[in-house]
Image (spheres, rainbow, N blue to C red):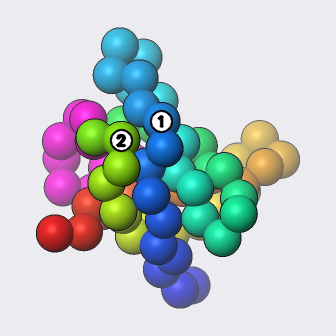
Amino acid sequence: MSRREGVVVEFDAHVGLGAIEADGERLMFHCVEIADGRRDVAVGTRVVFDLRWKFARPEAFAVQPLI
């Protein structure tokens, strides 16, 4: 499985849900999927992540902010 890159375009800290824009596709992720243990990430942050299918659609997981 190869890692993908994208940009966080939306994140709601209250519910812990966010969206990543990658290759013209919008992928959702939950804060527990942020790899370094933090529970929020700023909009505009470049990230790398893995992709999996959950509930019949793609989802980002193992989300890691790029420094």
- The magenta-colored residue range is 33-41
State the SS at label 1.
Answer: strand
Name the quadrant of the C terminus: bottom left
The reply to whether dot 2 and dot 1 touch (C-beta < 8 Å) is yes
Instruction: Residue at 83% x, 47% y: name it.
Output: 56
In space, the residues marked 2 and 1 are separated at their CA atoms by 6 Å
Above or below, 62 against 38 in this view is below
Magenta part, dominant SS: loop
Is 30 magenta? The answer is no
**Residue 65, picture quadrant:** bottom left
On the image, the x and y values in percent for residue 62 come to 39, 60
Q: Amino acid at mark 1?
A: Glu
Whether residue 32 is visible here, answered yes or no, is no
Above or below, 42 against 1 in this view is above
**Residue 32, picture quadrant:** top left
Residue 30 - label: none
Q: Which residue is mark 2?
A: 43
Q: Which residue is mark 1?
A: 10
Whether residue 66 is visible here, answered yes or no, is yes
**Residue 48, picture quadrant:** bottom left
Q: Amino acid at mark 2?
A: Val
On the image, the x and y values in percent for residue 24 come to 71, 63
Instruction: Residue at 48% x, 36% y: name it.
Output: 10
Above or below, 4 against 28 in this view is below
Instruction: Residue at 66% x, 70% y: name it.
Output: 23
Q: Residue furthest bottom?
A: 2
Q: Residue furthest front?
A: 44
